Image (cartoon, rainbow, N blue to C red):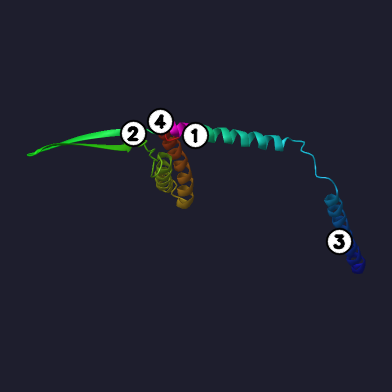
Amino acid sequence: MKKILLIITIAAVALAAVMGTMTLSSNSKSAPNADTVGLAQFQAWKADQYDKMIAANVAEEKTAVKQTVRRTTTRSSSGSMNSVSSHPAKEPETTEKKGWSKAAKGTVIGAGAGAVLGAVINKKNRAAGAVIGGVLGGGVGFGIGRHIDKKDGRY
C-alpha cells in the first residue's frame, strides 16, 4: 500500500511539473495581453499632470522671489554713512509639533491610574484588576486626549 501511495505521489508531482512547463512555454509564445483596464492611458495622463504641476511650480517660483532692501544709517563724529543690502525674502518655516500628543499622554496616564485603581478595587485578584483597570483607563485617557488634540488642531 505504501509503495502505491509513493508511486501515485511521484506521478502527481511529475505531472504537475510537466503541466507547469507547458503553461510557461505557451505563455511565452503568445502575444502580450491587451491593455483592457486602461493602465497605459492612465500613466500617460499622470505624466501629463506631473509636467503641468512642474511648470506651474517653476512659474510660481519666478514670481515669488522678492527682495527686501534694508537701509541702515550710522552716525559718527565725521559724518553719516548709508548702507543698502539686498536679501531675498525668507518664507516662513512650518513648525512641526514635537513631543507627545495629548492622546498619547492621556493613554499613559489613564492606563497607570486605571491599573492602580483596578488593583485596589479587586482585592481577591489584584493582577486581573490591574489589567482590566489599565485597559479601561487607557481607553478613557486616549479618548479625552484625542478630543483635546482635535480642539488644538493637531488632528
Residue at which label 1 appears: 57
Dot placed on the residue nearer the N-terminal end, 4 or 1:
1
Work out how far the residue at label 3 is from the one at label 2, CA to CA, in angstroms.
76 Å
**Which residue is depicted at the point 85% across and 59% down?**
17
| Amino acid tagged 3 | Val
| Amino acid tagged 1 | Asn
| Amino acid tagged 4 | Lys
Boundaries of the magenta span:
59-63
Dot placed on the residue nearer the N-terminal end, 4 or 3:
3
Q: Say whether residue 45 is left or right of residue 151.
A: right
Q: Say whether residue 11 is left or right of residue 133.
A: right
- Disc 3 crowd rating (10 Å Cα; few below 14, some 14-19, many 20+) is few
Q: Quadrant of residue 7?
A: bottom right
Secondary structure of residue under mark 2: strand
| Amino acid tagged 2 | Gln
Residue at which label 2 appears: 67
Q: Nearer the viewer, mark 4 or mark 2?
A: 2
- Disc 2 crowd rating (10 Å Cα; few below 14, some 14-19, many 20+) is few
Q: Nearer the viewer, mark 3 or mark 1?
A: 1
Secondary structure of residue under mark 4: helix
Q: Can you tell which mark lies on residue 151?
A: 4
Work out how far the residue at label 4 is from the one at label 3, CA to CA, in angstroms.
64 Å
Q: Is residue 6 magenta?
A: no
Work out how far the residue at label 4 is from the one at label 1, CA to CA, in angstroms.
33 Å
Secondary structure of residue under mark 3: helix
Residue at which label 3 appears: 13
- Disc 1 crowd rating (10 Å Cα; few below 14, some 14-19, many 20+) is few
